[in-house]
Amino acid sequence: MKIAVCLKQVPDMESKFKILEDKKIDESQIAFKINDFDNYAVEAALQLKEKAGGEVVIVTCGPDRSAKDIRQAFAMGADWGIHVNDPAVEAGDNFVVASTLQKAIESIGGVELVLTGVQAEDDQAAVTGVMLADLMGWPHCTNVKKLEVNGTSLTVNRELEGGLNEVLEMSAPAVLTVQSGINEPRYPTLPGIMKAKKKRLDVKKAADIGASAAAKTDFIKMFFPVSEHKAEIIQGDAATAAAKLVEKLKNEAKVI
Amino acid sequence: MAKIVAIAEHRNGKLTDATLELCKAAKELAGALGAEPAVAIMSKDDTLAKEVAKYIPLVLSVTNAALEGYTADGYTQAIKAVVETQDVKGVLVPHSYDGVDYAAKVAMAIGAGIVSNCNKAAVEGGSVVFTRNTYNGKIQEMKKVNTDKFVATFEKGAYDMEAAGGAGTVTAVSADIANVRTKSKGIIETMAGAVDISQAKIIVSGGRGCKDADKYKDVIVSLAQKLGGEYAASRPVVDSGWTDPARQVGQSGKTVAPDLYLAAGISGAIQHVAGMKGSKCIVAINKDPEAPIFNIATYGIVGDLFEVIPAMKEKL
Ligand SMILES: Cc1cc2nc3c(=O)[nH]c(=O)nc-3n(C[C@H](O)[C@H](O)[C@H](O)COP(=O)(O)OP(=O)(O)OC[C@H]3O[C@@H](n4cnc5c(N)ncnc54)[C@H](O)[C@@H]3O)c2cc1C
Ligand SMILES: Nc1ncnc2c1ncn2[C@@H]1O[C@H](COP(=O)(O)O)[C@@H](O)[C@H]1O
């Protein structure tokens, strides 16, 4: 089965964030990595390929820096990739990205299954996979926690609140958004890393693949949240703070 | 009159809390926009439409045998029929598992922009400005749509629940539902386990910051035992197999409200907080002073949990 995996590069959320002109984050202090959920999607695709053969193609919209993490997915075992590196897409919204991913996937030809992450850790939108499915005219399932493929029949578990799963049947071609915990993503091996360097990565502009969607939402500004319930921060080195905390839990909050 | 329509959510014949929250949101937004608030409900019959009419003046009820259970295709076709026949300007959807599954598809079907996972909406100069969490809760952003209609999903707790009181009208809206491409085979429980952490008075919970299974045990499990409480975890800890699923706290795990919830190496993502924000006293230990968990904690220590927790144990 030919599988496309949509992979987004996102900041490591433990980074120190600085906002520039209410508009964007200062990337100079930020380390980037594969969106956690997409890592599970890559692994799910690789496992399907190992079972039934086929090909795993990585599709990414992002700036130059994204190439590092496409290669990371290559090192895990993905076969090749398309990197749409276009400021116009970067300036767009989820709809622009979904439309671009659609064109990129159509340019591959013969793709029967598209896997995305449940959500991107940076924009936390959880809409791109569903939009993509609609654009392709394919059915979808979100929050997939288990996946079995038998020819073109898919049996999937859709995660629900409080530990419940709905078991669904559907047919490929389809788009599935993959939830964390569906598998254990592998770490690249040294030979994998060596091979990754030589794998094919097509770098495209939106126009090269016929993508030209316009955004349906406008970004206004960004800011740090102001909390009305900010914690009382207990000062001091670890030993001092720990002692004060225990004291407070006993005598102030009276919970231990 | 143009309408702001909240989509009702129900499971096992009961409306969810999110439905009542969105009744409030629809009323507020409709008021500010000079529009009419309504709820659209998809079901096999009218029973729940009458129930939701206690919370909102107008209920648009789509009944169809194909709507007995939730499907993205079924809901999208039904909501599209509502939007097309009822002069709908905005569609409000819970950012729940079902909501996330269909909201973007509805936006595509009606040609609307979508702003998802919002925690606030305000009307400024005639258009709705949405506020939402990004970067795992570290940064908020404001967005609006540039389309005529909008779809927005709201995180749980963004609005208070509307109280029952009115007696709204129920209007039937008919929709043809064809070609539903997913088939439900039923719902299963995946997190059953021997322990029930929801009854514990003290919970010590560890996150990805605990590094590995052994360290999680050394630090989190042992502190829980010393305090006579239960140990628990964020999702990545369970995903990595450091502890069992029955101990996961959050949207996809357990909801707990102990006297003391100590979160160590947990960033405070909304899906985690959803499961523990009702705790009486919350302690956060995190080396990142900007971690969102400090925005909901009672006491916080900015530091290395591998230094702070052993020091705490010495004082107990
Ligand atoms: C649909 C859906 C459902 C979800 N359901 C749940 C759920 O039920 N429960 C849940 O927990 N999550 C859930 N999540 C995942 C959630 O979005 C977060 O990814 C998750 O909660 C993050 O877990 P964490 O805080 O342990 O890890 P991270 O976000 O990676 O945070 C780790 C933290 O540890 C700190 N740290 C690292 N080292 C140290 C140290 N030595 N000392 C002190 N601090 C340290 C870091 O500063 C950081 O803040 C869900 C997500 C989705 C999309
Ligand atoms: N720029 C992008 N490039 C490739 N895939 C993306 C991009 N943005 C989002 N996706 C995919 O869509 C999923 C959901 O993202 P979002 O809707 O932004 O939360 C991600 O987990 C990715 O799989």
Image (tube, coloured by chain):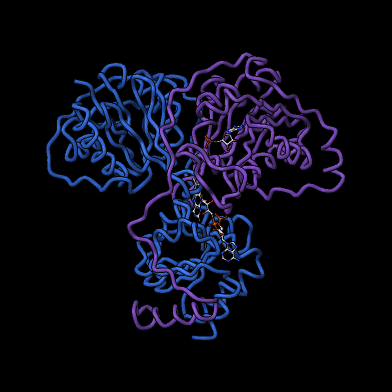
Chain colours: A purple, B blue
Judge by depth and name the residue closer to the eye, B171 or B302: B302
Residue at position x 60%, y 35% in the image:
A116
> Residue reaching furthest front?
A21
Side (left or right) of B270 relative to B286: left
Residue A58 falls in which quadrant of the image?
A: top right
Residue B140 falls in which quadrant of the image?
A: top left
A167 vs A132: above or below: below
Residue B153 falls in which quadrant of the image?
A: top left
Judge by depth and name the residue closer to the eye, A38 or B75: A38
| Residue B37 position in % (x across, y down) | 21, 31
Judge by depth and name the residue closer to the eye, B118 or B276: B118
Answer yes or no: is residue B194 visible: no
**In the picture, which quadrant includes the C terminus of chain A?**
bottom left
Q: Find ligand 2 in the image and state its quadrant.
A: top right
Number of dots carrying numbers: 0
| Residue B36 position in % (x across, y down) | 19, 27
A12 vs B289: above or below: above
**In the picture, which quadrant includes the N terminus of chain A?**
top right
Residue at position x 58%, y 39% in the image:
A117
| Residue B111 position in % (x across, y down) | 41, 19
B142 vs B84: above or below: below
Side (left or right) of A105 relative to B271: right
Judge by depth and name the residue closer to the eye, A32 or A148: A32
| Residue A57 position in % (x across, y down) | 72, 30
Residue at position x 48%, y 82% in the image:
A243
> Residue reaching furthest bottom?
B315
Answer yes or no: is residue A103 visible: yes
